[in-house]
Image (cartoon, rainbow, N blue to C red):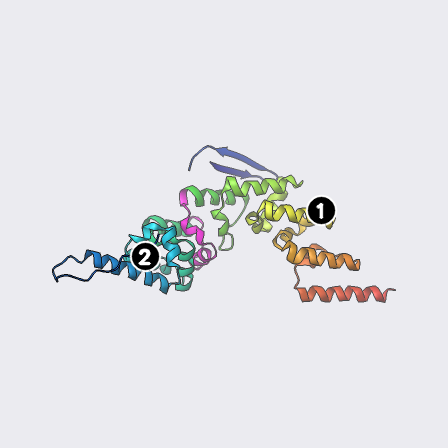
Amino acid sequence: MIPRLTTTSTSISISISHQKPHLFFSPLKPLQTPSLSLSTTDTGLQFRRKLLYLESLNVNSLKALLKNPQFRSSSLQTLQSVENCLISFGISRSSLGRILDMYPLLLSSDPHLHLYPVFDFLINDVQLPFPDVSKSIIRCPRLLVSNVDHQLRPTFYFLRKLGFKIDCHTTVLLVSSVENTLLPKLYFLRSLGFSDSEVVNLVLRSPALLTYSIQNNFKPKLEYFLKEMKRDLKEIKRFPQYFSFSLEGKIKPRHRLLVEHGFSMSLSDMLKVSDGEFNVRLIEMRLQLIDHL
């Protein structure tokens, strides 16, 4: 199912069309005669060469074989063609190893069928500058294992209708399901009392909102914001980045310090600064309070 969202300056209109897009080693056998077939020995040597090749890239060979059994029978040339393809688009060998370790399915992929279409999409549809293509892949390697027609392009059209200009910082959103990921987050924000246009403005100002979990991020932080901090939702409209900060590591400790001293700060002043600067501001506020006594 591919959701389509059309926007105006004041509303989100949603319509949905129903389209269904043991690891083991065989020991090498010695040659019996010079005329004997070398296939068994050759296969073993090729297999070992592939493992050594993976090691040179810092790829976990056991994980690769478990997650991609086809790699065992694929040729070393296939792996090299994947490397050549990715390097030709500016991806360094160190980044290449990390990408292949994360997504071992790429080890047996056909660049012409699976990789070049992704690059073509990023360059021609999204219109990323060439240097930004490698930045996008390094930030979000999952792009390489996402189908262009059934995943990337529909999400791209959806985001573009919302008003997004996709760049190397927001290409990560392209791997999200419109129906299962993006729309539920938009609906959740709207359920807080925001209008459709306000929701769109929030995510355009802070695209990372669309990457956060509703259950693990939005709900606990919102509950703390409303029940413990007793603040108005208008503050989140002004500072949606609130959801990007750690609840346990930053939001709660800083709020408790402010409450302990009877002080108040805007969300941005409370959260955007370093721990050192926050403590300096706290001391300054305490000094000002003393001066007024």
Task: Please give the residue where the numbered disc 1 appears in the rendered image.
Answer: 226
Residue 286 inside the magenta-drawn segment: no
Using the rendered image of the protein, determine whether residue 220 is visible from the camera's viewpoint.
yes
Query: Where is residue 46, by image quadrant?
Result: bottom left
Task: Please give the residue where the numbered disc 2 appears in the rendered image.
Answer: 79
Q: Position of residue 173 (x, y in %)?
A: 50, 49
| Residue occupying the point 63% across, 40% down | 190
Kindly state the secondary structure of the residue where label 2 is placed. helix
Quarter containing the C terminus: bottom right
Q: Main secondary structure of the magenta part?
A: helix
Q: Nearer the viewer, residue 29 or 261?
A: 29
Q: Position of residue 74 (x, y in %)?
A: 29, 53
| Residue occupying the point 36% across, 51% down | 68
Kindly state the secondary structure of the residue where label 1 is placed. helix
Part of the protein shown in magenta: 125-149
- Which amino acid, mark 2? Leu
